[in-house]
Image: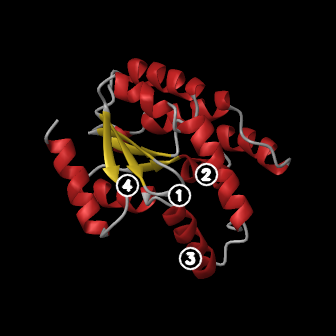
Amino acid sequence: MRLLIMGPQGVGKGTQAAKLAEHYGIPTISTGDIFRFNIKNKTELGLEALKFIDKGELVPDELTNRIVEDRLGQDDAKNGWILDGYPRNASQVEALDGILAKLGTPLSAVVALDADHDVLMERMKKRAEIEGRSDDTPEAIAKRLDVYAKETAPLLDTYEERGLLVKIDGVGDIDAIQANIVSALDAR
């Protein structure tokens, strides 16, 4: 099973990715985790990414694509994976298509979690209170949701046209949401 899990910040992607990874016995691959691993272990890719991060810049797509390709080629991902946080734009979709073709591993499905804007804002506000995250101000949250709506949400149309999209309501009991995802994937 090779899955993308997509949706706006605060919809529960990380939570559901972890549950699905356990259910299917495959790793969750988060681009944030990949970056942190490569930086911590001072890999060539990590040191290259750090040059941008240290300047407060986004890591360019080309480097992000190389880091994702490297991770998807590792042994623990041979039997499948759940990719969280990538692709974020049309250029990354094209790169991922190339990576998967090169690896001979087609995408199984794209799980799109959704929730009402007000629900997302409330969840993020609670997360900020619990985790003490300074980047979860109402303004910052609204900006990230706006960027998602403009850059990433349109990618769902691409995957729908390819017949890969599985839309799931991200509101409700965590286990019930997971059961809905598994049921939808098993029905494919």
Examine the rendered structure and indicate whether residue 150 appears above or below residue 99.
Answer: below
Question: Which dot marks residue 145?
Answer: 2
Q: CA distance from mark 1 to mark 4?
A: 21 Å
32 horizontally vs 1: left or right: right
Q: Nearer the viewer, residue 90 or 52?
A: 90
Q: Mark 2 vs mark 3: which is more N-terminal?
A: 3
Asked if residue 23 shows in the view, the reply is yes
Secondary structure found at label 2: helix
56 horizontally vs 24: left or right: right
* Amino acid type for the residue under numbered disc 3: Lys
Q: Mark 2 vs mark 4: which is more N-terminal?
A: 4
Which numbered disc, 3 or 1, marks the residue closer to the eye?
1
Residue 44 location, quadrant: top right
Label 3 packing within 10 angstroms: few (<14), some (14-19), many (20+) = few
Residue 67 location, quadrant: top right
Q: CA distance from mark 4 to mark 3?
A: 20 Å
Which numbered disc, 2 or 4, marks the residue closer to the eye?
2
* Amino acid type for the residue under numbered disc 1: His
Q: Which residue is mark 1?
A: 117
Which numbered disc, 1 or 4, marks the residue closer to the eye?
1
Q: Mark 1 vs mark 4: which is more N-terminal?
A: 4
Q: CA distance from mark 1 to mark 2?
A: 8 Å
